[in-house]
Amino acid sequence: MTVDALTDVAGLRVGHATRKGDGWLTGTTVVLAPEGGAVAAVDVRGGGPGTKETDALDPRNLVQKVEAIVLTGGSAYGLDAASGVMAWLEERGRGVRVGVDPAHVVPVVP
């Protein structure tokens, strides 16, 4: 079996939003892991990368799985796009448990 697209991987969902025109030219892509998360890794390169939570993916750290990955512009606004994804996941109880209540989660979204 040849895998040519992210959506060929069982359980992954991908969504994209673009805003262009009237001075705008931006977009965000979200790769949503199946419930329970997915193991992820990162390779950050370049002279001025904008990253969020990528250091958490180091295997020596507490985080073992991600709920989603956000691919977007590296500006502060691009990095903040992950906040909306985190809110959506938190509403559904998806993330690292941080309390006894099942609703107490922190979604990991690099």
Image: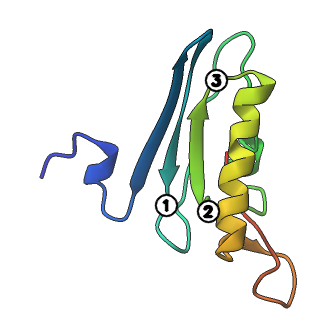
| SS of the residue under disc 1 | loop
Of circles 1 and 3, the one toward us is 3
- Percent across and percent down for residue 108 are 70, 57
Q: Amino acid at mark 2?
A: Lys
Residue drawn at x 68%, y 77% as measured from the top left:
93
Q: Residue furthest bottom?
A: 100
Which residue is denoted by mark 1 in the rendering?
Answer: 33
Q: Measure how far apart labels 2 and 1 are at the Cα level.
A: 9 Å
Q: Amino acid at mark 1?
A: Ala
**Disc 2, disc 1: CB below 8 Å?**
yes
**2 or 1: tag closer to the N-terminus:** 1
Residue drawn at x 55%, y 74% as measured from the top left:
36
Residue 72 as seen in the image, left or right of residue 104: left
Q: Residue furthest right?
A: 99
- Percent across and percent down for residue 24 are 60, 15
**Disc 1, disc 3: CB below 8 Å?**
no
Q: Amino acid at mark 3?
A: Gly
Which residue is denoted by mark 3 in the rendering?
Answer: 73
